[in-house]
Image (cartoon, rainbow, N blue to C red):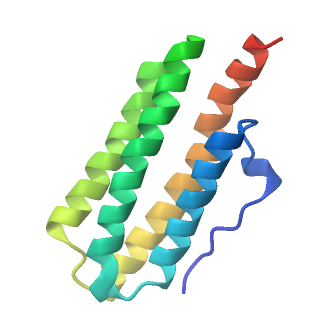
Amino acid sequence: MGVSFIWEEKYNVGDQEINRQHKYLFQLGNEIQEAHINDAGRYVMKLIRYSKDHFAHEEDHMETIGYPNLEQHKKLHDELVAKLSEISANFIKDDDEFAKFKSFLFQWLTDHILYEDKKYFDFANHQDQ
């Protein structure tokens, strides 16, 4: 196994539902980290389906609160879904590619929550004051 997704307080965005969804993404990430290459496609498809639902939920919330960077944030979501779809279509052919995918997924997800989602929730929390 490569890296582990471990939920820490630094990932808390201040919204219980979004935190729950992020924790589930971490769970999926850990399942992928432990998966055998033969199961990679199934896990990537599961990740794509859940990510689309999660991203739609976040984007609806951003629209509701008038988040000014919605389009830029949505573009990041769309780029990840496109990348996951490309990986799914071309499939992961060997252990090296699978390891690179696992590393990419870990980096993308943790960075996205820490930097991009935090910006949006800082804005949302500021709106509540």
- Confirm whether residue 67 shows in the render: no
Q: Residue 119's quadrant in the figure?
A: top right
Q: Quadrant of the C terminus?
A: top right
Residue with the most extreme left position: 89
Residue visible at 45% across and 75% down? Answer: 32
Side of 55 where 129 appears, left or right = right
Q: Is 22 situated above or below 17?
A: below
Residue 79 % position (x, y): 33, 42
Q: Quadrant of the N terminus?
A: bottom right
Q: Is 13 situated above or below 31?
A: above
Residue visible at 78% across and 58% down? Answer: 8
Residue visible at 58% across and 63% down? Answer: 26
Q: Residue 14's quadrant in the figure?
A: top right
- Confirm whether residue 50 shows in the render: yes
Residue with the most extreme front position: 17
Q: Is 54 situated above or below 48?
A: above
Side of 21 where 100 appears, left or right = left
Q: Is 50 situated above or below 97?
A: above
Residue 83 % position (x, y): 29, 53
Residue 31 % position (x, y): 50, 76
Residue visible at 16% across and 67% down? Answer: 90
How many marks do you count on the picture? 0
Residue 64 % position (x, y): 54, 15
